[in-house]
Image (cartoon, rainbow, N blue to C red):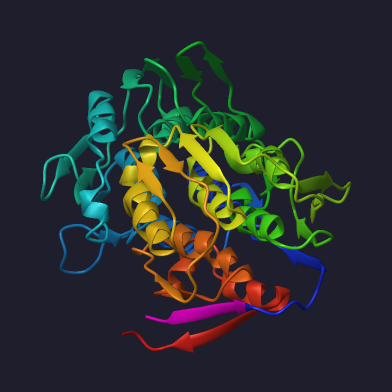
Amino acid sequence: MANLKLSYKLQTSNFKLKISGSKSETNRLLILQALYRNLVLENSSTSDDSEVMIKALGAQYPIPNTQYPKIDVHHAGTAMRFLTAYFAIQAGFEVCLTGSSRMKERPIKILVEALNELGAEISYLEKEGFPPLKIKGKKLTKSKVSLPANVSSQYISALLLIAPKLENGLELTLEGEITSVSYIKMTISLLNEIGVETSFIENKIIVKPQVTIRNSQYTIESDWSSASYWFSISALSEIGTQITLSSFKENSLQGDFALAEIYKNFGVETVFHDNHSITISKVSTKFQNSFNFNLQSSPDIAQTIAVTCFGLGISCHLTGLHTLKIKETDRLEALRIELTKLGAIISVTNDTLTLEQSESVNANIRISTYQDHRMAMAFAPLALKVPIVIENAEVVSKSYPTFWEDLKQFGFLLEEIESD
């Protein structure tokens, strides 16, 4: 496991970079591509999570001397949820779906119960309600199911992605107040893009059955979550710093597109160009001393925003974060611990984070990453302020494998150091 000491030496104020395709879009489209083989994808994500999906989707063959294949998704939560639904409808195929020790602590009962209600045959191999799972693929003919509306959008998307291949489609009722609407809408939009008929009225989503689709080629937008770290770098940089990123759409399906609006508050201007690139520029150092943001539709950027606010010496109150406790780590608790090391005064609840205004950042602090890629990348921009050490830095490969090389190109200095 590599530990990296980061510091910064200005090399450029006009930087250009192409970011890999959206992990969220890629993983949804990989499931759809497995269901509709004529779907051609361009600009797919190079993340570990997407590689896990590709490998798993190619595993539908018997392994000698085993009762059924064992597929290990490691830390990939999206893969676990989407593949559970996908393998549930692969009639005649049995699989054991497992993951890392942390994955075995991440709940999946709500999704399993919904699939079993539709006629699937899924059972738990260890702890009730958690992976690993034994899935016996079947043809599902039932079409109506309900879910609590405030569950992880990945459960909902998992069902929607297989819905057009169900004999009678799917009528999904969401009970209560819906959270993470942007990710649900992303899934529905991608279904629509390939010709699947859907409706989303109030709390009911209907997906019509679709045996085949027209030959379709889809270019995946670059990843706004990955772009978030460059927004943070821009916010913490000197006025005049320009960073051009591609390929991004002004009508993005990704919830983290909210970055462009949020970072205006930190003096960062975003300009969209006709060639699907964006230029983000630091244009001001005059902003409020305190901000409130509801990140219910884009919780993955909470870590980046919290660290940005700390680096700028301003306070913030973030809400809508209840899903962060069941990610690769308990992200709220991890943020509290690591920001406190740096000198922050911070408190968290089950769904909020409150950071008080601070005047300095402690230097040469070692940041634990908890096997969480976003912890590593969210804290890295602080090296613009003080030297910082990121432990187990290779964890970034989960979503952004070239992150450290891209930072070096921008002007960050990286030194590999030994563990304590």
Q: Tell me the quarter of the image containing the N terminus.
A: bottom left
71 in the magenta segment: no
**What is the span of residues highlighted in magenta in the rendered image?**
1-7
**Snapshot quadrant of residue 119:** top left
Q: Does the magenta stretch include residue 3?
A: yes
Residue 14 x/y as whole percent:
84, 67
Relative to residue 361, is residue 138 depicted above or below?
above
Q: Nearer the viewer, residue 105 or 410?
A: 410
Q: Which residue lies furthest to the top in this view?
A: 202
Q: Residue at x 63, y 49 (%)?
A: 224
Q: Which of 70 and 223 is in front in this view?
A: 223
Task: State whether residue 296 is above or below residue 354.
Answer: above
Image quarter in which the C terminus is found: bottom left
Query: Is residue 103 among what the camera can see?
Result: yes
Residue placed furthest toward the right:
274
Q: In which quarter of the image is residue 162?
A: top left
Is residue 365 or residue 124 the one in the foreground?
365
Q: Is residue 144 left or right of residue 236?
A: left
Q: How many marks?
A: 0
Q: Which residue is drawn at 45% across and 34% down?
A: 157
Is 86 drawn above or below residue 188 in the view shown? Answer: below
Q: Which residue lies furthest to the front in this view?
A: 359
Which residue lies at the image location 40% right of the left edge and 36% below the top edge?
352
Left or right: residue 218 compared with residue 129: right
Residue 256 position, x and y percent, is 60, 42
Q: Position of residue 61 (x, y in %)?
A: 32, 60
Magenta segment, prevailing SS (helix, strand or loop): strand
Tell me: 92 left or right of 357: left
Q: Can residue 120 be seen in this view?
A: no
Kindly identify the residue that appears in the image at 72 percent across and 62 percent down.
237
Can you give x and y, in whole percent of width and height, for residue 212 in the image? 56, 34
